Image: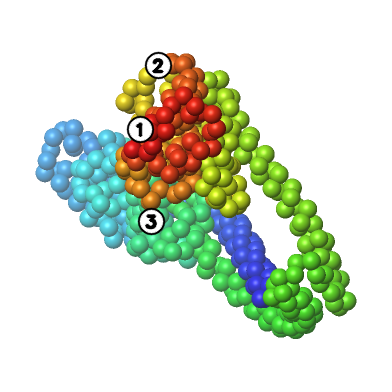
Amino acid sequence: MVTFVTVALLLAVVFIVVTVSVRNQVRQSVASNLESTQRLFAAVETRRQRELRAQAETLADNATLKAALDTYQTETRADRATVRADLLATIDQVLGNVAARVDSDAIVLVDTRQATLAAAGRMADRWPRSRPVALVASKAPDSFDGVARMGDAVFRVVTVPLLLDDATIGTLYVATSLNQEYAQELDHLAGHRIAIVGDGLVLATTLTPRASRQFESAVAVEHQVDGTVALDGESYAFRRLVAVGDTVFYALGSIDESSQAAMRDAMRNLAFVGVFGIGLAAIGSFWLARLLSEPIGALSDSLAAMAASRNVSARLPVTGSSREVDTLTETFNALMASVGEAQAQTQSAYTGAIRALASALDARDPYTAGHSDRVSVLSVAICRQLNLPPADVEVVRLGALLHDIGKIGIPDDVLRKPGALTAAEFDIIKQHPVIGARMLRSVAFLAPHIPIVELHHERPDGQGYPRGLRGDEIPLDARIVHVADAYDAMTSARAYRSARPPAEALRELWRCAGTHFHADIVAALANSLPGVISDTTHAELEPV
């Protein structure tokens, strides 16, 4: 499995690298082609526009047209409407003859105020008479291009002035509609998709309608010069061919379409490499599995036998067939030999860690210094009176050292307050068993002591905290530490009171036996404190 997964990952990495490499190469190739197309297109269009201008200049020299226009302007000033109408008809006829000699969508004659006088050609109806023409000219100094918008139609225009005696009497426009037909003509010329953009809108394009809308929102609004864009699920490189006024001509090349052939070749080669690699991996994996499984199987059998016999002191035999497995076996033998020593060291470190935690708590308040140690001593004395097993006594001894460890999480202004606590402050103090238990749960070897830490303030009558357990629901360990804790608290001085005598403290424990404390535990404590009851009667010490 390791071998197969390694080969699969290697093939995946190779596939990704090849795919990215091919796409980058294709992207660079498409961008380079678009750059070449831009230069070629600019040269061809410049020559084409010059040829159109040359044709327009030849047409503008038509003496009949000039004479008719000059006469019309003269009659207009004389306000002779009948004559003007005849002259406009003459201009229409002459302009129609002129339009027949030029391959354009419209030939338009405008006066000196840039108002249309006459139009001829396939789209002459888009140029109504007397309508002013707003021409946006190209910014290039050697260009005669311009763009004119007439209703919903946009035209690319070559302009030529009509001169009579060195005075301009009008302008002749050779107009080509920027429509779908024009875009297809540019597509054929450039060898790429074409998009003609004006005012942030696609006027004409050879892209699909959906791709056109995406290009419009991604590129057209900002008039970007070049780059890449995702259109209709394909990646395209685009480049601006030419800008005429606010109208921009873009060429687009599909990177995905251009990379298909290269990707097919790459995938074919990768398939061959993959089949060869998988076959080689199969042979190697079977050989490797056999080489490793036999010595590991022998080691596993030896371990199973050791587990069945529970004899951890026995040494495992080395197989001699695998250096690595033999090294592992010898290391295991050395490890098992050190287990005994490690157990002793662990126990010592375990006890030391508990004492360090108890000392950390006592260091916070000088009035409670030594409290945890004294409670531990008293708890052990009670255990011995109850004849508990040594293992249980050890759990109680160390648990008593930790019983108040949760007070580390109580603020100093509450924990060390010299006077009586308010109800709110006492509620905070009551959280220390929960805090302590939560602290110990993160340390696995302290788990046996968690019930003592968490439940040493529970009472037989169910009025304790934090769970409100009753009677025998409270673990014996927690009951023992509860009594020892209360006794030491009463017999130790605090900032807000002096220590009680042992007899008085014991009398208070008996008074509360059955409600606050378990009577059998109080009795065990009393029997473990010789001399404490010398000044009291036996009757006073009987459980209530």
Residue for point 65% across, 79% down: 271
Disc 2 secondary structure class: loop
Q: Name the residue under label 1.
A: 511
**Pointers 1 and 2 in contact (CB under 8 A)?**
no
Disc 1 secondary structure class: helix
Q: In this view, does 234 lie above or below 542?
A: below
Q: Mark 3 points at which residue?
A: 214
Q: Mark 2 points at which residue?
A: 419
Please name whichever residue, 511 or 461, is drawn nearer the observer in this view of the structure.
511
Residue 192 in view in this figure: no
The amino acid type found where label 2 is placed reads: Gly
The amino acid type found where label 3 is placed reads: Gln
C-alpha separation, residue under disc 1 versus residue under disc 2:
25 Å
In the image: residue 378, left or right of residue 61: right
**Of marks 1 and 2, the one in the foreground:** 1
Q: In which quarter of the image is the N terminus?
A: bottom right
In the image: residue 54, left or right of residue 269: left
Here the colouring is rainbow
Q: In which quarter of the image is the C terminus?
A: top left
- The tally of labels here is 3
Residue for point 56% across, 72% down: 260
Tell me which numbered mark, 1 or 3, is placed earlier along the sequence.
3
The amino acid type found where label 1 is placed reads: Arg
Label 3, residues with CA under 10 Å away: few <14, some 14-19, many ≥20:
some
Give the x, y percent position of residue 319.
85, 77
Please name whichever residue, 292 or 487, is drawn nearer the observer in this view of the structure.
487
